[in-house]
Amino acid sequence: MTVFIASLLLPKTIHFNLPGARPRGASSAQKKASKPKNPSPNTPPSLFQPAPNHITPPHTPTEDRKHNDPWANEDGFKVQIPQTPFSPDGGNRAPIDRSSPTWGGRADQPMSRANSPPPSSLIDSSRALIKKARELGRQGITQPQSLVRSESHDRVFAHADWKVVSADQGNGGLRNAAEAAARDGKLGDYTWVGTLGMPVDALMGTQQLQDIEDKLANEHDMLTVLCSDKDFDGHYSHFCKQILWPVFHYQIPDNPKSKAYEDHSWKYYVTVNQAFADKIVKNWKKGDTVWIHDYHLLLVPGMIRKKIPEAKIGFFLHVAFPSSEVFRCLAVRKELLEGMLGANLIGFQIKEYARHFLQTCSRILSVEATPDGLQLEDRFVDVINCPIGIDPVSLSKHREESEVKRWLDIMRERYAGKKLIVARDKLDHVRGVRQKLLSFEMFLNMNPEWRDKVVLIQVALSTSEKSELDATVSDIVTRVNSSWANLAYQPVVYLKQDIDYPQYLALLSIADALMITSQREGMNLTSHEYLFCQDGKFSEKKHGSLILSEFTGTSSLFNGNELSVNPWDYRACADAIKKALEMEGEERERRWKSLYKAINVHTGSHWFSEFMLRLDKVYEEQHSRDQTVVPRLSMTTLLQQYKRTERRLFILDFEGTLVSWGPVNQIIPVSPQRTLDVLNDLLLDERNTIYVMSGRRPEELDRIFRRVPNLGLIAESGCYLKDCGSDTWTEMADANKISSWKSSLQDIMTYYLERTPGAAIEERRCSLVFHYKSADDYEMAATQASDLASHINDACEEQRVHAIPMDGCVLVEPIDWTKSTAAVRIFNDLQKRMGPDEKHKSPVDFLMVVGDGRDDEKVFKWANQMATDDTVKVQEVVTVSLGNRATEAKATLTQGVSGVLTALQKLSQVV
C-alpha cells in the first residue's frame, strides 16, 4: 500500500536549458572564469571574503536584494542540499545562488502571470489613490504597467529542453525525515504530492507539461498538483504568509491591508487546497494512507473525507498552534478547524500546541475535548504531540566533506583566541533578532572584561520588503560595532543573507554557543544540528552551550539542560550569555550529553515512523467503532448466550435507552409503565442482577423506580450508587472535593448566566448544569455556553472537573467518578459476594451493557475488556449502542427504546 505525503512543494523541481542561462549549481571556479577580476556590485559577500588580489577595493553593497525566495524553508532559508562536484545533469549539490530570485524570477523557469493580489483599491483610501494618480500623471504614466509577456516567451519554455533537479525550497525537515525512514526500512512505498515550485501558466496545455508530470510520477514517485499562477500567488504569498503565518506565531494582523488580504485571498487558499484534494482522491486506492503537512493545506483533510469517508488520513502541523484567544481572530476560523478535523490523527510538535488546538475546537466548534482527542458527533479524532528531529546519519556524512574542513580552518585562523556566539535567523519580528542584539549589547556593557574576547556572528535573511525592523537591527549592529570595534576586533559580524551548507556546518562546529531568541517557533532544528556538531570530532571546540528561547517548541524536549531565556528579558539574556561563556567544562559536558541524548531519540526517522504507527493504530480503533462496521444485535445469538449462563449482570442506561428523552431538569411525572414491567419480569429470575444508570438525582430515580424491587441504581452519572435490594444510597464521590469545586465554579457560571438572558443553572449533588435551550437569543447563548465550557476546562483542570457541551446545555461533572467507575464498583462487590466455585469461574458469566450516549462509551470499553481479562474473564459480554455515532459497543440497535424493551422482554420469557 502507498503512503501519500502531501506537502506544498515537491522535493524536485524543473529547470529549463535556455540559451545564455548559467547552469544551475555552477561551481565557484566556473563562475570566476567567466567573470572579470573586479567583482560586480551585486555580488553577495561570503561569510569571509578572501583578500583581493587587485588594488581597487571591492564595491560596498548599497542595497539589499528586493526579494527573497518565497519558497524558502519556514525558518527563512533554503533547503540545504548536499554539496557534490558540479555536473551538468543538475544532481544534488549545495545551492550556490544563495539569494534565490522570486517565484517566477529564475532565468531557467517561466515567469509568473499572476497579478499580485489584492489590488491597491482594496488597501488604499480614495484620497491616497488620487494623490498617487496625479503623481504618476506628472511622470507621463496613465495606466498601470503589467508584466510584459510575449507569446515567444511561452513558446521558448514550451519547447526548451528541461531536467528534473532537487529543489532548494520547501520543508527540508520533512524531506529528510522521509528519506531517513525509507533508508531505515520504516517506510515502504510512498508518493509525494505537491506543486513544482514554479509558475506553470506558460506551460498549460502543452505536451511539455504532460511530459514533466509523467516523468515525475514514473521515475520519482511524485504527483504534481497544477495551479494557475494567480491561484498559487494568492494562496501562498498572501493568505498563508500575510494571514496564517503571523496568527500562528501570535502576530495578529490588524490593519486595513491585512483585512484586504484576508478577504481577497481566501478563495485562492480554498482553490489550491481543493486541487490537492482532487489529485489525492483521483489516485487513492483502498488501503492507502494520506499524510498531509502544515498550515498551507489545512482544508485538505476535510475535503478528502467528503469524497472518501473511509480514507486513512493523518495531518501534522509543523509550526506552532496559538491559543484560542488568538486563533479566534481569524474570520475563517471554523472552516480551518473543520478542515483539519477531517483527519483521523492530528499531530503537533509539542503538548502545548495540542492543548491549544483542543481548547480552540472546544470553544469555537463546541465539541467535547478529551485528553486523547475530540469527540465529534459521528466519530473521534485523535490528537497527539510528536516532535520532529534531524537525520544524524545524513548530517554526519556531510560533516566529513572537504569543503566543511576548509571552512573550519579559515574560521580557526580568523577567530583565534575568540569566543564565538552564532545565530541564524530570518529577519522578521517572530525570530527575535532585535532582542538578541540588544541583549548582546547589554552583555558587553555589563561585562567590559569580555570586550575584545567574544564575537557574535548573526546570519540573517531579509524579508522581501524594507521594514522598520531591518533598519532598527542595522542601527543596533552599527552602534555595537562603533562602540567597541577596533582594527583587529569586530564584536558583531552581521550577514544579511544565507550561507552555504559547508559554511553553516563549520560555523556550528566551531561555535562556543548558539543563541536562539525566537518569540514563537514550532520546532527549531538548528539547535538540534548545533548540538550534533558539538561532539568534538572535527573541531577542538566541543560541548558548546545552547541559549534557547522558552517560546520555541524545542525547549520542551530538553528538560532544562539548555539555558532557557525569555527574549524580552534583556538582562536575563545577557546573564545567559555570560553563563554560557564562563561555564565550567564539566557542567558543559553534562548538559551537552543530556541534550545530545534527546536529539538522538527524537530523530526525523523516529518521528516519521512513530506518527505512521499511531495513525495505523487509531485508524483501526476508529474504524472498529464506525457505525457502518458495527453489526446489528442478533437476537438469536443473544438468546443463546443468555441460555447458557447463570450469573447475569445487566447495566442499562435510562434516558434514551429505557425511556425516550425527557426534560433533563424536570422529574418525569409519570412512570414509564412498559419499562417497569419489563424490568420486573427480568428480575423474576434470581440469576439476573440489573442496574439502571442515569444522570438524574437519586431522589428522582427513587420516585421513578419505587415499584421495581431489587433493582440497582446509579445516579448522577456514577456519583451515587444504590445496591440491589437496598434502601440507602452510597455516595461514591468525595463530598469535600465536590463542595470545593462547586464553590469555585459558582462565580464563573453566574458570570455567564448574567450575560445569557433566559438561561438557568441546575445544581445537582455532584454536578452543575448550565441550561440555555430556552434562552432569548439561542445563537448568542450557544456562544456563551461554548466560552463557559472552555473557561471551565482551562481553569479547573487541576480540580479534576470537566465541562461537556451537550444539546442545549453544558454539563459540569467530576472526572474521577463516572458510570464506568460505578460499574467497576458493582463488579467488585459481586466478586466479593459470589466468588468462583466448581461451576463458575467468575462472579459474572453474562454481562450486558446498553446505552445511547457518549458517557456510556466508557462503560462499553470496560465491559469489552472484561471479556479478555484473564483474571476475571466474563464468558459472554454484550455491549449495545443505540446512537448513530461511532461507538465502542460491539452491536447496535436501530429500533431505539422500543427495540431495547422488545429484546429484554424476549430474554425475560426464556425458561
Image: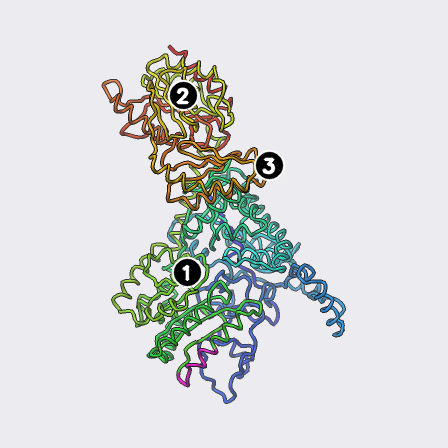
Amino acid beneath label 2: Asp
Kindly report which numbered mark, 3 or 1, lies closer to the viewer in this rendering.
3
Picture coordinates of residue 2, whole percent (x, y): 47, 45
Nearer-the-camera pick, 519 or 415: 519
Residue highlighted by disc 1: 525
Lower position in the chain sequence, tag 2 or tag 3: 2
Residue highlighted by disc 3: 776
Residue highlighted by disc 2: 702
Which quadrant of the view contains residue 682? top left
For marks 3 and 1, give the CA distance. Answer: 53 Å
Picture coordinates of residue 295, whole percent (x, y): 52, 53
Q: Looking at the image, is 804 positioned above or below residue 393?
A: above
Label 1 with label 2: CB-CB less than 8 Å = no
Label 3 with label 1: CB-CB less than 8 Å = no
Label 2 with label 3: CB-CB less than 8 Å = no
For marks 2 and 3, give the CA distance. Answer: 34 Å
Q: Which structural element holds mark 3? A: loop
Residues drawn in magenta: 478-488
Residue 218 in view (yes/no): no
Image quarter (top left, top right, bottom left or bottom right) of the C terminus: top left
